[in-house]
Image (tube, helix red, strand yellow):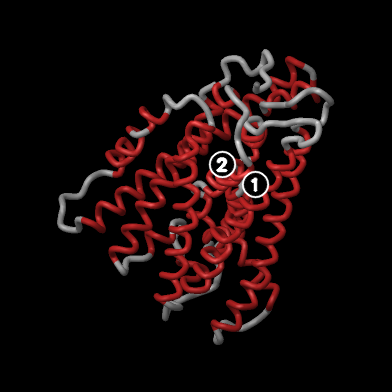
């Protein structure tokens, strides 16, 4: 029988513990990728500026300079990837750090560290802000992706406002929000994780096919020091946003059964490793190739920049919308309680 404590009663993501390691894999992929993949190019644009000055190279040979910049930026992405995985490992270990007790929710760790009332006030507001903010971003991303899909499939149709597509995107959640727990949305999250890898692959292969643009520039996007500083810190925020999902790690791990012989951290960590491999395949090629091909003119959503082949870009935008539906549900599972 699944173990049930008083904190589990009424919390829909913990109604049973029968998840497998691969459940945690695509749960984490869906939670982490989200809309971050669409913003990865802007991270490269904004953070490459200091690298450009550091190299002291001429821009007459775009290929050599861009390769030098991308080499440094690759290390930056590797560092952010590794540090994110390290902090997530800490979360996985903390889930059962107290004997005979499982911290099934984020605020329970806060209560253990800062006592019952103070822990709630420290953790819950921050977690709610993150989840609401991320879901708003997902709503906008999903609506814009549906709009792009519509425009590609029916270029001669009457244009519709983005807000209408956001409402269309939101309508599916009236149904999905009735699913009671993480395991009940496993199919949705598996489809979302698959779509993330699919549309990312479409994006970077389409970029390679398009090639380096003739007017590509790897210079500053801002003309003032203040603008450059703001862009730099904005990019740091995008790096943090690109690895969302830490706020739901404990809840995901709570769905995995645990015994003294086989604690939940073992299958959970196995799923996390697999998830980070998929996330790397989603982020690294798109971000680096996108900057190489478009330079500082790259859009925050690379699929908006690409126009041809029309059917492929339309399919990719539809895949983005499907993926973001799953990402929205991951955050909603926690926020709704």
Q: Residue furthest bottom?
A: 60
The answer to whether the residue labelled 1 contacts the one labelled 2, judged by CB atoms less than 8 Å apart, is yes
Question: Marks 1 and 2, Cα distance to the nearest angstrom?
Answer: 9 Å
Q: Examine the rendered structure and indicate whether residue 262 appears above or below residue 235.
A: above
Q: Could you tell me which secondary element the residue under label 2 belongs to?
A: helix
Task: Indicate which disc residue 271 carries.
Answer: 1
- Rendered image quadrant of residue 45: bottom right
What residue lies at 66% left-to-right and 26% top-to-bottom? 105
- Rendered image quadrant of residue 119: top right
Q: Examine the rendered structure and indicate whether residue 228 appears above or below residue 122.
A: below
Q: From the image, tell me which residue sits under label 2.
A: 27
Task: Indicate which disc residue 41 carries.
Answer: none
- Rendered image quadrant of residue 77: bottom right
98 on left or right of 287? right
What residue lies at 26% left-to-right and 58% top-to-bottom? 152
Q: Examine the rendered structure and indicate whether residue 144 appears above or below residue 212.
A: above
Residue 53, percent across and down?
66, 73
Q: Could you tell me which secondary element the residue under label 1 belongs to?
A: helix
């Amino acid at each position: 029988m699944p173990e049930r404590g008083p904190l589990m009663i009424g919390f829909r993501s913990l109604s049973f513990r029968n998840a497998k390691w691969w459940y945690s894999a695509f749960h984490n992929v869906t939670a982490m990728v989200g809309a971050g993949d669409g913003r990865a190019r802007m991270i490269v644009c904004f953070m490459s500026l200091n690298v450009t000055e550091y190299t002291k190279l001429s821009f007459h040979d775009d290929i050599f300079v861009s390769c030098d910049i991308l080499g440094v930026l690759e290390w930056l992405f590797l560092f952010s990837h590794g540090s994110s995985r390290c902090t997530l490992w800490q979360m996985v270990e903390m889930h059962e750090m107290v004997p005979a007790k499982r911290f099934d929710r984020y605020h329970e760790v806060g209560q253990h560290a800062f006592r019952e009332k103070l822990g709630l006030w420290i953790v819950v507001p921050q977690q709610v802000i993150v989840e609401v903010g991320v879901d708003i971003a997902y709503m906008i991303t999903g609506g814009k992706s549906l709009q792009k899909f519509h425009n590609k499939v029916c270029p001669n149709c009457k244009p519709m406002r983005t807000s209408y597509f956001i409402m269309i995107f939101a309508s599916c959640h009236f149904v999905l929000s009735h699913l009671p727990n993480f395991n009940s949305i496993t199919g949705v999250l598996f489809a979302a994780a698959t779509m993330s890898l699919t549309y990312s692959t479409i994006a970077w292969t389409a970029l390679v096919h398009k090639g380096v643009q003739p007017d590509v520039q790897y210079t500053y996007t801002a003309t003032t020091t203040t603008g450059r500083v703001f862009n730099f810190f904005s990019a740091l925020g995008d790096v943090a946003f690109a690895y969302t999902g830490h706020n739901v790690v404990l809840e995901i791990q709570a769905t995995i059964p645990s015994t003294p012989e086989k604690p939940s951290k073992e299958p959970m960590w196995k799923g996390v490793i697999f998830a980070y491999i998929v996330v790397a395949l989603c982020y690294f090629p798109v971000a680096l190739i996108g900057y190489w091909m478009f330079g500082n003119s790259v859009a925050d959503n690379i699929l908006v920049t690409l126009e041809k082949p029309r059917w492929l870009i339309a399919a990719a935008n539809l895949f983005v919308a499907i993926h973001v539906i799953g990402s929205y549900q991951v955050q909603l599972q926690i926020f709704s309680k």
